[in-house]
Image (spheres, rainbow, N blue to C red):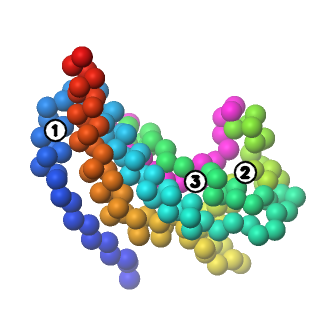
Amino acid sequence: MADEVQIRLDGIDELKQALANTSKRIRTQAVRAALRQAGRVIQAAAKQSAPVLAIPTKTRSSGTVKRRISVRGSKFARQAGDEGVYVSVKPLRGKADTRRYGRASASNPNDPFYWRFVEFGTRKMGAKPFLGPAARTQGEAAIQAFMQSVIPQIDKLNAKANQ
């Protein structure tokens, strides 16, 4: 049976009114910033509940997965003309990550590629989920954080644009 989540939103009318009176650039910036703020609520809960390796080995260091949990913008939402963020474990990619942590590989102790095995389990290992439960338990708090920060963000950006 699927888990059921019910969330009640207050202030949607105020949000619609505030968004209707702004330019597209301001709407985008305000909504993106508020979504990141909401994502940080879930990120904090996920980092708190992420399992940490007790004894580091040659190919795994303690806290790698916990350190790499991040809030990132969704390019798929942007391509669809929407705004979105997701909370996930950031893989090693790009020049900056390669310089700082080394190349992505199973033998690199700084590569968190194995987070999926921890979150969802394998045939030989049970799951120890940390992202899913964080999203379920902090979902309502994240929405409240979004609602509390989006209208002030819009007002702030409008004031800056009118100067």
Q: Which circle's residue, 3 or 1, is located before the other in the chain? A: 1
Quarter of the image with the N terminus in it: bottom left
Q: Residue furthest bottom?
A: 1
Assess whether mark 3 and mark 2 are in contact (beta carbons under 8 angstroms).
no
Q: Which mark is residue 69?
A: 3
Q: Which residues are magenta?
A: 79-96
The amino acid marked with disc number 1 is: Ala
Question: Who's the residue at 71% across and 78% down the image?
Answer: 124
Assess whether mark 1 and mark 3 are in contact (beta carbons under 8 angstroms).
no
The amino acid marked with disc number 2 is: Asp
The location of residue 47, given as percent across then percent down, is 57, 60
- Nearer the observer, 117 or 85: 85
* Disc 2: which residue: 111
The amino acid marked with disc number 3 is: Ile
Quarter of the image with the C terminus in it: top left
Element marked by disc 2? loop
* Disc 1: which residue: 18
